[in-house]
Image (cartoon, grey):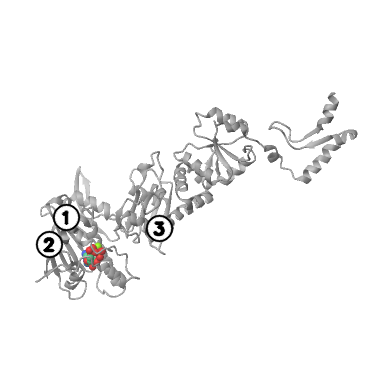
Amino acid sequence: MQKGHIGVTTENIFPIIKKYLYSDHEIFLRELVSNAVDATQKLKTLSSVGEFKGEIGETPVRVILDEKKKTITISDRGVGMTAEEIDKYINQVAFSGANEFLEKYKKDANAIIGHFGLGFYSSFMVSKKVEIITKSFKEDSQAVKWSCDGSPEYTLEDAKKEDRGTDIVLYIDDENKQYATKAEIDNLLKKYCRFLPVEVVFGKETEWKDGKEVETGNDNVVNETKPLWTRTPSELKDEDYNKFYRDLYPMSEDPLFNIHLNVDYPFNLTGVLYFPKLKNNVEVQKNKIQLYCNQVYVTDSVEGIVPEFLTLLHGVLDSPDIPLNVSRSYLQSDGNVKKISSHITKKVADRLEEIYKKDRENFEAKWDDLKIFVEYGMLTEEKFFDRAKKFSLLKNTEGKCFTFDEYKDIIKGSQTDKNKQLIYLYTTDIQGQHSFIEAAKNKGYDVLVMDGQLDSHFINHLESKFENSSFVRVDGDVVDKLIQKEDEAKLDLTEPQKADLTTIFSSQVPNVDKANFIVTFEALSENDAPVMITQQEFMRRMKEM
Ligand code: ADP
Ligand code: MG
């Protein structure tokens, strides 16, 4: 039997690990299951490059609970470890075997989860003793058992184990005994392991028979190894996306649109984002995006990783390139995180523009739900404003939708004040301001509806962005001072056409008076005729005398 001292500088690393390694004790299960997944993926990689020639066979990761003994065992049929490897990867705390493996097999490696080299030790946050019983895949390997009771002393000895792979046995301590229950393990597996790429089995499947829950004899697989976001978009239908949405957020209404992300350069990012049907209270709907690292759930708080307005989206992001073991404030300054964040913003704008261009009717139909999201983005992200100004819509009291450019064209001939400012009339309350709206309409003005949650901010923002324009509430006094120039707009004649018409009309005037009549094309009000032949003012006065 070998006895030794775990290679760390501080004698009392364990109390530190227990307290500070992760604020959440429950992540121990995620760490151990993902190590088991890594070991399994490594074996598959070695097999694909010919370094493992044996039979891979079935490779589920099994989580086994002994409620009486208060032990949890995590068992895999992956690469296993030799005594030397235990020395290297386990005894030297913070020496991450995963990093070394990745360096060596960069090209072929299936996604490896471990990065920090401390995951295994998180088991001591909840255990009074941990055992590793492992046998390497290498031919003629001797199985070994490592055992440590949470002091820096460990033991390592030969053991009996037929099959390759690793069993990690946790002896859960009294303070954490709640983890040694079926319900709690179910919970944790569902939260952290739901989409892991290797099957994870916990107990037996059950079904209801004669009012009782009975085991079916089949393994209870807790995860979906190929979740939607890892699949090829061209193979997926709207219904698949909607189904996945309902899996993530049961009882929710179908989302409006989805965006499938898939980038592998210059960073790795996959995921599916959804535009939810937002209800009035926006705050409660933030932070529904789940963040994964190689299909391991990490957090549902994406603040600092995506721009604020995108926290309204729902869905899944998966990236091994988001450094998750650092503080949020550090995240914001991280180069990769910045790139990822602006990539997502761009994708969201791309998708909205695509729908707007391809299917404007559909886009308009969903505008009421999209509006708050688009406005939020335009208010807070300059880059998004520049993209969205092409498809952001303004809606008038008749329910018609216009892009900014379209709307400007509509009002530019008819809604200016004496300083030639373009005046956007709007209402904040269609019912309450009804009579003002009607009055404005009777004068031929158009009135926008701006009664959304963000509209008052949005109006200010548009005023600062639109040149020589202001927004005036329809019950304000400016309405009366607007100058209409609609006659010119209505008639729209070219100079040669005007000249021709003048000739025709003048021919009808008695010859003697010809010089004293003028033909004008400027109607004075909406009800006036568009063309008038008038006697010059002094002639009229002469006659009246
Ligand atoms: P990381 O996963 O970040 O590398 P861990 O502390 O979780 O760090 O694990 C340390 C190392 O121990 C791993 O890199 C791996 O080499 C080895 N290891 C842990 N669990 C297993 C396992 N189930 N099978 C084989 N090797 C393992
Ligand atoms: Mg790990």
Residue 219 appears left or right of 352: left
Q: Quadrant of ligand 2?
A: bottom left
Determine whether the residue tagged by mark 2 lies in a helix, strand or loop. loop
Residue that carries the numbered disc 2 in the rendered image = 151
Who comes first in sequence, dot 3 or dot 2? Answer: 2
Residue that carries the numbered disc 3 in the rendered image = 338
Q: Residues within 10 Å of mark 2 (few under 14, many from 20)?
A: some
Q: Residues within 10 Å of mark 3 (few under 14, many from 20)?
A: some
Q: Nearer the viewer, residue 467 or 312?
A: 467
* 421 versus 124 height, above or below: above
Question: Marks 3 and 1: which is nearer the front?
Answer: 3
The structure residue drawn at horizontal position 72% and vertical position 31%, both measured from the top left corner, is 528
Determine whether the residue tagged by mark 1 lies in a helix, strand or loop. loop
Residue 318 drawn at (x, y percent):
35, 57
Residue 57 in view (yes/no): no
Inspect the image, locate mark 1, and give the three-letter code of the amino acid beneath it: Val
Q: Quadrant of residue 49?
A: bottom left
Q: Which mark is residue 126?
A: 1
